[in-house]
Image (cartoon, helix red, strand yellow):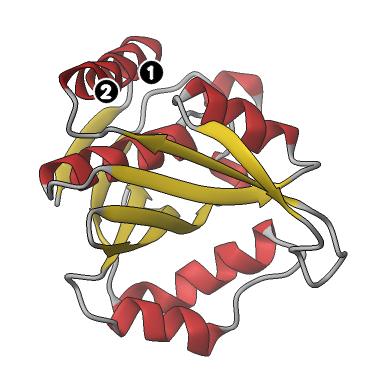
Amino acid sequence: MPQSEQSAAYSVLLRYATIADLSNIMTIEYQCFSSPWRADTMRADLEGPKDRKIYLALEVNGELAGYIGAHYYAGEAHITTLAVDPQYQRMGLGELLVLTLMSKVVALGGIYVTLEYRASNRAAERLYAKLGLVPVRIRKNYYQDTGEDAVVAEMSGLQEPECQATIEQLAADWRRRHQHDVRVRI
């Protein structure tokens, strides 16, 4: 995407993902990952119990541009997938998806968010550090396609006032940096 387009404001909608999004999600999944999820696995997650799964879709000007999924149980959210269509990357949308999911987990009374990312994925490392997720351990040979290690990162204490203030400040900072018209329907 040309630099001039990257700075343009877009109409962004964050909503719950549904099974109707599966085809578009899988298209993005295959564009973004060398080892994408299988469609039947993604379908099972989208159709899973709504009190145990949080899947959000992000639309830009009415087109599905990204998604995030997490398993939620006993106050813990484990982010299992996050992707933004390559044509919409570097617009802050991945950051917005994570912030929105963290806010949802806080609203549900959750206390903990965790995820894994490839040890070589510097963009993910920077994003998650910026959002306050702290690397806590390495999972050796985690990725089946390459045998690469995974970094496990987490944020705990989501119900603590300081943590909630941090998430709110990160969201306010995001809004200052981006001129997108964002609507949230979750």
Q: Secondary structure at mark 1?
A: loop
Q: Residue at x 38, y 18 (%)?
A: 178
Residue 57: percent from left, percent from top: 33, 57
Distance from label 2 to label 1 (Cα)?
23 Å
Q: Is residue 180 left or right of residue 162?
A: right
Residue 104: percent from left, percent from top: 20, 45
Q: Which residue is mark 1?
A: 178
Q: Residue at x 37, y 60 (%)?
A: 70
Asked if 132 appears above or below 23 in the picture, the reply is above
In which quadrant will I find the N terminus?
Answer: top right
Q: Residue at x 36, y 18 (%)?
A: 174
First reached walking from the N terminus: tag 2 or tag 1? 2
Residue 91: percent from left, percent from top: 51, 29
Between 165 and 35, the one nearer to me in the picture: 165
Q: Is residue 100 visible?
A: yes
Do the residues bearing badges 2 and 1 touch, measured as CB atoms within 8 Å?
Answer: no
Asked if 79 appears above or below 6 in the picture, the reply is below
Other-residue count near label 2 (Cα within 10 Å), few / some / many at <14 / 14–19 / ≥20: some
Task: Kindly indicate the quadrant of the structure image that contains residue 144.
Answer: bottom right
Q: Which residue is mark 2?
A: 163
Residue 7: percent from left, percent from top: 50, 18
Q: Secondary structure at mark 2?
A: helix
Other-residue count near label 1 (Cα within 10 Å), few / some / many at <14 / 14–19 / ≥20: some
Between 168 and 18, the one nearer to me in the picture: 168
Q: Is residue 12 visible?
A: no
Q: Amino acid at mark 1?
A: His
